Amino acid sequence: MGYLTAFNTLTAETYSATGAQTLEVSIDAIEAYCIVHQMDSFDRAIQQLLTSLYASRAQKPPNGERAWGRAAKAAPSATTAQEP
């Protein structure tokens, strides 16, 4: 699952690459891909899954919470908020 964590963290506007799809459904899709494409790498299977799910990915965390792995946006400081 490290690949998915990296994808979620590094891809703009992505909180969850698999969106509402359950882990079981994602694993079944990867398994089905591997059965048909036995000479492809596991990495390629995950890439295909992510490509197929990209449009339906969760772009923001539920309830507007801060996404894990990402720094919170800094509040403007008192010195930058005032005009010179």
Image (cartoon, rainbow, N blue to C red):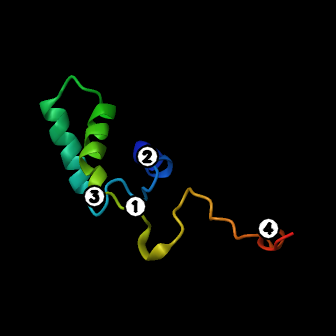
In this view, the residue in front, 48 or 23, is: 48
Instruction: Where is residue 17? Give x, y as percent.
Output: 36, 53
Q: Which residue, as the protein is rendered here, is positioned at the far bottom?
A: 63
Q: Which residue, as the protein is rendered here, is positioned at the far top?
A: 39
Give the foreground label among 3 and 4: 4
The amino acid beneath tag 2 is Phe
The amino acid beneath tag 3 is Ser
Instruction: Where is residue 66? Give x, y as percent.
Output: 54, 68
Give the foreground label among 4 and 1: 4
Instruction: Where is residue 81? Give x, y as percent.
Output: 77, 72
Q: Name which of mark 2 and mark 4 comes first in the sequence.
A: 2
In this view, the residue in front, 34 or 55, is: 55
Residue where numbered disc 1 is placed: 59
Q: Is residue 35 left or right of residue 62?
A: left
Q: Name which of mark 2 and mark 1 comes first in the sequence.
A: 2
The amino acid beneath tag 1 is Gln
Q: Residues within 10 Å of mark 4 (few under 14, many from 20)?
A: few
Q: Residues within 10 Å of mark 2 (few under 14, many from 20)?
A: some
Residue where numbered disc 4 is placed: 80
**Residue contact between numbered discs 2 and 1, judged by CB atoms under 8 Å:** no
Disc assigned to residue 56? 3
Residue where numbered disc 2 is placed: 7
The residue lying at 24 percent from left, 55 percent from top is 24
The residue lying at 14 percent from left, 34 percent from top is 35
Q: CA distance from mark 3 to mark 4?
A: 38 Å
Q: Name which of mark 3 and mark 4 comes first in the sequence.
A: 3
Q: Quadrant of residue 42?
A: top left
The amino acid beneath tag 4 is Thr
